Image (cartoon, helix red, strand yellow):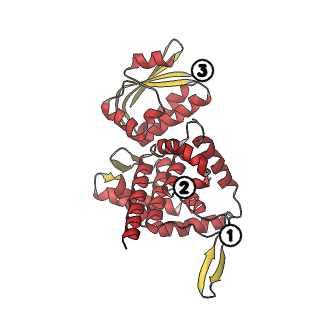
């Protein structure tokens, strides 16, 4: 899986590409933790190139969401493919995260 | 920290009498099997998606319950390319009685429980397991109350415990009746968040429905 990070004003934009599963979870957790350096954190996660997410991937996002809530920040997801969106719907993770249609909308919502 | 199978055994013991609360054996089996699977999941030995379960690391954890469940799953994975989550759950559930007895032995060895033998009606041998150290249970209860009665995002262990407690219909361990009535949507939201937990919920409710149907038609 590829993970990259950039700043867009006060928002950290994390781009996830490929498969977020148990083999990628540790690296993803480290990268996402780095996005919380500024408090309160404002994080937009671009998932438009994420092709697969497993339970291990969902756990990484859950831990991130908890840390962001503790720091009174905001995390927004954008650009979910239909199969990834289905995982969020079935698992109820769509009730934990604000989800926007694309990365630009996620950045705007995270401000 | 206790493992989920140990937590379930403790949870199912009546705090006052030290005896096991009534729970159909088949429901207990899927809950115990699910507890083992979810502990393996949080220890990065297995992973799941909407359809299947994968063994991603066969390294034993040094825990007889978890290592037995892991070996069983690895055996299935050697024969089939994909293991549906319900199939994995039923495989783990087959050894639930052994897991209960192993978890009890460990809890006694760690000083959490005592074992007392007695006789019922001077004939039948009985065993009680009074809790001697309940500080971990109290901590779990306080943490789960906080998660269930607020919008706080749970950590993954809290999600698993809520799934297991709800599957055993033991939310009274955490919430009063009035609190539970108000928190039903929150319980439903959180118990969906683990995919193995969803399979446990389905299997437990199907088993329970069959037992209730049988009881009303006999």
Q: Is label 1 in contact with label 2 (beta carbons under 8 Å)?
A: no
Q: Secondary structure at mark 1?
A: loop
For the point 54% across and 29% down, the residue is A33
Estimate how packed mark 2 is, as few (under 14), some (14 to 19) or many (20 or more) residues with alpha carbons within 10 Å: many
The residue that mark 2 highlights is: B4
For the point 28% across and 59% down, the residue is B79
Same chain for labels 2 and 3? Say yes or no.
no
The residue that mark 3 highlights is: A38
Apparent side of residue B68 relative to residue A17 in the rendered image (left or right)? right
Please, is residue B170 above or below residue A24 in the view? below
Residue A53 x/y as whole percent: 38, 37
Nearer the observer, A41 or A72:
A72
Count of number-bearing discs: 3
The residue that mark 1 highlights is: B114
Estimate how packed mark 1 is, as few (under 14), some (14 to 19) or many (20 or more) residues with alpha carbons within 10 Å: some
Residue B119 x/y as whole percent: 63, 83
Nearer the observer, B71 or A97:
A97
Chain of the residue displaying label 2: B
């Amino acid at each position: 899986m590829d993970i990259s990070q950039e700043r867009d004003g006060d928002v950290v934009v994390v781009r996830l590409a490929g498969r977020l599963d148990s083999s990628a979870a540790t690296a993803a957790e480290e990268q996402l933790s780095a996005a919380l350096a500024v408090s309160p954190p404002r994080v937009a996660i671009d998932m438009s190139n994420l092709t697969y997410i497993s339970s291990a991937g969902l756990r990484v996002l859950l831990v991130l969401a908890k840390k962001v809530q503790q720091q009174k920040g905001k995390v927004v997801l954008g650009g979910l493919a239909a199969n990834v969106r289905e995982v969020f719907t079935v698992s109820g993770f769509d009730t934990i995260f604000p989800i926007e249609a694309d990365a630009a909308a996620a950045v705007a919502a995270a401000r | 920290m206790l493992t989920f199978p140990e937590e379930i055994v403790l949870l199912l013991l009546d705090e006052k009498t030290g005896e096991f609360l009534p729970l159909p054996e088949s429901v207990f089996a899927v809950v115990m099997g699910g507890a083992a699977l979810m502990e393996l999941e949080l220890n990065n030995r297995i992973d799941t998606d909407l359809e299947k379960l994968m063994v991603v690391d066969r390294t034993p954890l040094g825990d007889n319950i978890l290592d037995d469940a892991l070996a069983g799953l690895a055996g299935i994975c050697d024969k089939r390319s994909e293991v549906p989550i319900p199939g994995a759950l039923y495989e783990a559930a087959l050894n639930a009685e052994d897991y209960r007895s192993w978890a009890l032995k460990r809890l006694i060895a760690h000083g959490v429980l005592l074992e007392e033998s007695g006789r019922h009606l001077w004939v039948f041998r009985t065993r009680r397991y009074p809790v001697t150290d309940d500080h971990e249970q109290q901590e779990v209860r306080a943490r789960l109350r906080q998660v269930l009665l607020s919008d706080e995002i749970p950590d993954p262990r809290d999600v698993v415990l809520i799934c297991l407690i709800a599957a055993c219909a033991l939310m009274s361990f955490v919430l009063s009746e009035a609190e539970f009535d108000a928190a039903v949507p929150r319980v439903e939201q959180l118990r969906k968040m683990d995919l193995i937990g969803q399979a446990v919920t389905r299997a437990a409710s199907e088993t329970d429905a069959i037992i209730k149907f049988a009881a009303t038609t006999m």
